[in-house]
Amino acid sequence: MSSDRKSLKLVPCPACGGRVFIPADTPPLQTAPCPKCQHAVMMPWLLRQFELRSMIASGGMGTVYRAWDTTLGREVAVKLMKQELAGDEAAVDGFAREARACAGLNHTNIISIYTFDREGPDRYLVMELADQGSLDDRLEKAGRLPELDVLDVGIKVAGALSVAFKHGLLHLDIKPSNILFGADNEPKVVDFGLAKRADAEKEYGTPFFGTPYYISPERIEQKGDTFLADMYSLAGTLYHCVIGHVPFDAPSVDDVVAAHVNTPLTPPKQILPELSQATSDCLVRGMAKNPADRYPSYDEFIMALTAARSQLLIRQFAPQASEGSGTTRWWHR
């Protein structure tokens, strides 16, 4: 019995929460099935003071793990860069750019960066844990989201982008998968890997990067990046959330990109009649083809989103107020 015990290691299962034994010779970061629920259980790995315990998500640049900070005694997220990219100077620079960009920002709705370091060949980023899924995950599960929830996310993310812009930073890759949620259900803007200084000189003839379903026309035409490009991408993200499909869809990426430049936007209220006119108008203006036709500041965009939210709340609660003793009593509570 003792020899069997020596060949096993007790680790927590991220799915069922139980502490289970897995083979002790399982390599670090590799998984074995949980004996109780069959969910993949990962062999922990200590990276400096951070014990990586389970995988949260994986992307092109690296993998994000739920980890335990053994020094400060708290849960964190560790983004571990893929080792095959360690020799790619551009990839390393992008990974470092994400750390530097977020490090100077302090906002409830921007993911907090704790440290950026390397251990041997491994480069890693330690940040606030936001493990309640992304806006993209919620869309996949629900198809489309309630108008009030979409407006709440829009107001908060616009506030985060406003703070970033006040620090001279453009995100340039706003999309549903780059908005995560923490335990408090607050949206968190993540992935500043494409971020650039707002005062950077225009670069002509260079490739543009971004997600084609949400990219602004001026970025496609390489007319220069401003905060209005992020506003367009956020409005496009909110459009997707409230309608249930992207603003422009087409058989190929080239066709999608061309649609952002040439195809008139269908107002969301034409697709979803029950949507409030104020929300529809707000998203249409935020996605105007000409940047000059969008809101001239984040403050005005946020005010428009907030006004739409207030009108929606009044519309939702007014029928309740008119029941019984009438609306007058409701207004004077």
Image (tube, grey):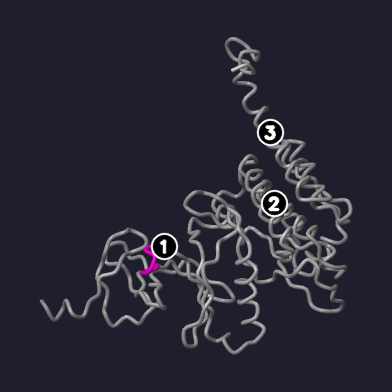
Q: Report helix, strand or loop for mark 2.
A: helix
**Mark 3 sits on what residue?**
310
Report how far apart the C-alphas of labels 1 and 2 lie in the structure.
Answer: 27 Å
Which mark is drawn over residue 160? none
Which mark is drawn over residue 158? 2
Q: Which of marks 1 and 2 is nearer the N terminus?
A: 1
Question: Residue 41 appears in which quarter of the rendering?
Answer: bottom left
Dot 1: few (<14), some (14–19), or many (≥20) neighbours within 10 Å?
some
> Which of these two is toward me, 5 or 72?
72
Which amino acid type is shown beneath numbered disc 3? Ser
Report how far apart the C-alphas of labels 2 and 3 lie in the structure.
Answer: 17 Å
The percent coordinates of residue 133 (x first, y second) are 52, 57
In this view, which residue lies farthest toward the left? 1
The percent coordinates of residue 113 (x first, y second) are 55, 66
Seen in the image, is 12 located left or right of residue 82?
left
Q: Give the range drawn in magenta.
A: 69-74
The percent coordinates of residue 258 (x first, y second) are 83, 65
Which amino acid type is shown beneath numbered disc 1? Glu
Dot 2: few (<14), some (14–19), or many (≥20) neighbours within 10 Å?
many
Q: Main secondary structure of the magenta part?
A: loop
